[in-house]
Amino acid sequence: MTSTSPLLRTEALTRRFDGELAVEDLELDVHSGEIHAVVGLNGAGKTTLMRLLLGMLKPDAGRAIVLGFDAAAVASEVWSEVGHLIESPFAYPELTVEENIAAAALLHKLDPPLIPSLVAQALEEFELSRWSGKRARTLSLGNRQRLGLVSALVHHPSILILDEPANSLDPAGVVFIRDLLKTRARRGAAILVSSHHLDELARIADRISVLHAGRHIGSLDPTGVDLEKRFFDLVYEEDIASRGTVT
């Protein structure tokens, strides 16, 4: 069940780099309790979209809206309701795993007296207790990814924006992330997630939007068959239409 008003929304969102369109006239929303997945080839605009929603980039036109506020000028109190993992996981290399999680909790404005217990819970939930005293720079890629996810989730945000959250994880880690996101959505979080793995997204997503050359070109039914074929059909049809080729 989703709420009427989306927690994340874009309105004719457009962004260029050196004159080249990265995101063009994009309309997209994510509701409370929903997992909305975005898929596309490399360079489709997925990460740019997420950076715009997080206020890391400013649009050339249109708006990215977070909890009803323009992401280009949002107060820090609003960002305390958002968790994100974009490209590289958050970690200070010289801090331990435990210290990194505590730092993330402080950055998200959690009450300091509560942080030790929250860190302990997070270490157990993400199966990182064994490495709690290890410096982040010594972790394997998979455990570094888990640490980045802890940092995004330790404050129990109402919005999650995750770019390839299962990167570097083994099969058990992928299943863990799947269950984690479904649980957070059931508790009311609005989740925007990207991945190259359509079969995995189909297991968790309520909606799947396809981006290509910065545009929203269609949707995939998570319960449908042969999602990969449908995805490439949409991309091919868009390429043909953009070239004006008659077949």
Image: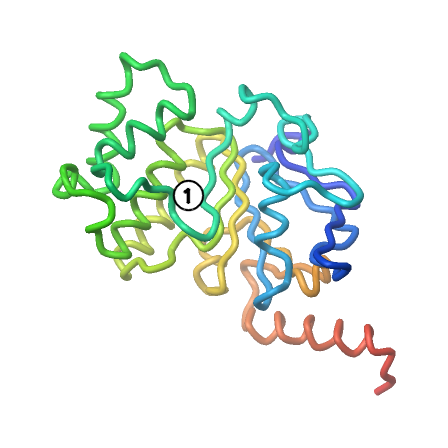
Q: Which residue is mark 1?
A: 181
Image position, residue 169 (x, y; %): 30, 58
Q: Is residue 42 left or right of residue 102?
A: right
Image position, residue 106 (x, y; %): 36, 23
Residue shown at 73%/62% (left/top)? 217
Which part of the image, by quadrant, shows the C terminus? bottom right
Q: Is residue 74 left or right of residue 192?
A: right
Q: Residue furthest bottom?
A: 247
The answer to whether 49 is drawn above or below residue 156 in the figure is below
Q: Amino acid at mark 1?
A: Leu
Residue shown at 53%/45% (left/top)? 35
Mark 1 crowdedness (10 Å alpha carbons): few <14, some 14-19, many ≥20: many
Residue 141 position by quadrant: bottom left
Image position, residue 59 (x, y; %): 73, 43
Residue shown at 54%/19% (left/top)? 77
Query: Relative to the observer, which residue lies in front, 92 or 62?
Result: 92
Image position, residue 28 (x, y; %): 69, 46
The answer to whether 208 is drawn above or below residue 81 in the figure is below
Q: Is residue 237 left or right of residue 87?
A: right
The answer to whether 138 is drawn above or below residue 57 in the figure is below
Which part of the image, by quadrant, shows the N terminus? top right
Residue shown at 76%/49% (left/top)? 14
